[in-house]
Image (cartoon, rainbow, N blue to C red):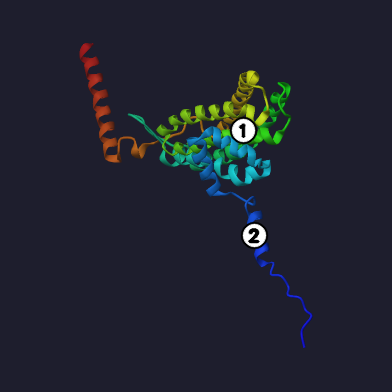
Amino acid sequence: MESNEQPTPDNSSTNKSSGSGNSNGSGPCPKAILELVRGLFSAPKASLAKVEVENKSINQIYKQYLLILVALPAIGTFIGTSIVGMSIPFVGTYRVPFFSGLISQIIYYFLMLGMVYVYALVLQKVAASFGGNNSLQKSFQLVAFSMVPVFVGGILNVVPMLGLLGILFAVFTLYLFYLGIPLFTGVEEAKRLLVFIITLVVGLILAVIISMIVSLFTPSTPQPDTSSMFGDTEQGEVMQRMQREFEGLSERMQQDGN
């Protein structure tokens, strides 16, 4: 006797594939970040065109990219200023107190996450006033992806002297931003420079505000690490003794002169 029951299709593979697709935007994606960084540095124009076509939402960009990228300069600065310190000849090694440095960089992290959004709002309004589109999503894409070099370069702050190389990363960020203005905002080529200058000025103002807020939680005159001032404690005692002998010699010379 034949059975009339129909075979039930196996949907497990379909569910797995859909699940893996959903997990793509559920959190930070280191592989996607590495691909983005490599693309922006090796082929910036093609890489910007690619992310523009992908058209990721603001939420996706935050989760997949910015949560990790914005942490890089914060971590680098904390290690460089509070753990490594800056060595100054004949003075010592200056370090920001551990908890002050930690709190200031946590504040910096969240302010930077917010600044990307605010900067995108500014770009949206400026671009619209010059005949571009009025898309916050596109403006956010340009701001977020053009700032990738600055975030990546911030890890160099681990060694304070290398932090000066951050200027090069900042210049490259400006180049990416300028390059992407027509593509993301729809602004005409003739008006691109004006949009670039206006948004750049606003960006500098925002950067100054963030620096001022972070500085409120960072000691302005950190105390030198005297244990390493002259390499070790013994050398420090030798230098102090030489200083006392020099002062004594100066006093005797003044007395002989009188």
Left or right: 129 as drawn, with respect to 34: right
Residue 202: percent from left, percent from top: 63, 24
Which residue is found at the position 24% from the left and 15% from the top?
254
- The residue type indicated by label 1 comes to Val
Depth check, front residue: 122 or 137: 137
In primary-sequence order, the first of circles 1 and 2 is 2
Depth check, front residue: 254 or 15: 15
Q: Quadrant of the N terminus?
A: bottom right
Which residue is found at the position 65% from the left and 19% from the top?
191
Using the rendered image of the protein, determine whether residue 48 is visible from the camera's viewpoint.
Answer: yes
In the image, residue 126 above or below residue 78: above
Between circles 1 and 2, the one closer to the viewer is: 2
Using the rendered image of the protein, determine whether residue 107 is visible from the camera's viewpoint.
Answer: no
Residue 39: percent from left, percent from top: 51, 39
- Name the secondary structure under disc 2: helix
View extreme (top): residue: 258
In the image, residue 250 above or below residue 226: above
Q: Quadrant of the C terminus?
A: top left
Left or right: 20 as drawn, with respect to 159: right
Quarter-of-image position of residue 3? bottom right
- The residue type indicated by label 2 comes to Ser
Rate crowding at label 2 as few (under 14), some (14 to 19) or many (20 or more) other CA atoms within 10 Å.
Answer: few
Q: Which residue is mark 2?
A: 17
Residue 157: percent from left, percent from top: 45, 36
Depth check, front residue: 179 or 83: 179
Residue 174: percent from left, percent from top: 55, 27
- Name the secondary structure under disc 1: helix
Which residue is found at the position 57% from the left and 49% from the top?
29
Quarter-of-image position of residue 62? top right
Q: Distance between the Cα atoms at labels 1 and 2?
A: 32 Å
Q: Which residue is mark 1?
A: 143
Left or right: 90 as drawn, with respect to 46: left
